[in-house]
Amino acid sequence: MSEVKLQVLMFYQDDPKKCTAAKMVKFGLAQNIKKIGNKGLVLDPFSEKTLLPKDKSSINSVVGIDCSWNLTDQVFSKKFNGIKRKLPPLLAGNPVNYAKLNKLTTAEALSASLFILGFKEQGLELLDKFKWGHTFYELNQNLLDEYSKLENEDQIEQVLKDFRLL
């Protein structure tokens, strides 16, 4: 598998001009969906489990839930199908939440998941569509490299200590 299917479930809660999910759909990098399949990996910031490279074997797509950060509690209280995973800690590269921990756009979250799952080229291609995309990668390149080697969640704490994020 050289690429994985990207999907977005859009709630249209933010400024359409700044919506990274809409831009990904426009450029054919992601598919706008209404329903999540059972083998879709859903990026959920409230998930008990963190995304690991081994998750690649049990999925057929990665799904980003596109909603406002101000409404995440409300949106993620809904029951979604799929395999739910949160991302390990990362810094935002987008201009709105620059350098804030875990305040990622949908594009940043999907790109990060691609790196962790071993689809680095696809992750870089996605970031190329955004002026600030390279900034996200530069801020997180070393972390993403380490996350892509993890075998279990217990190792995340050591990575964070190594990078002085803990």
Image (cartoon, grey):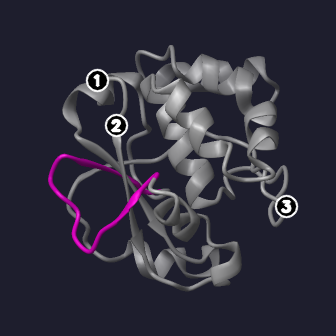
Q: Looking at numbered disc 1 in the image, what kind of residue is underneath it? A: Met
Q: Quadrant of the N terminus?
A: top left
| Residue at image point 79% right, 23% down | 163
Find the residue positioned furthest to the left: 38
Highlighted magenta segment, given as a residue range: 29-44
Label 2 crowd bin: few (<14), some (14–19), many (20+), radius 10 Å: some
Which numbered marker is on residue 95?
3
Q: Quadrant of residue 9?
A: bottom left
Image coords of residue 46 (percent x, y): 45, 58
Residue bearing the label numbered 1: 1
Task: Left or right? Give the position of 152 relative to 157.
Answer: left
Q: Quadrant of residue 166?
A: top right
| Residue at image point 23% right, 38% down | 59
Q: Looking at numbered disc 3 in the image, what kind of residue is underneath it? A: Pro
Image coords of residue 141 (percent x, y): 72, 26
Q: Earlier in the sequence, mark 3 or mark 2?
A: 2
Residue bearing the label numbered 2: 4
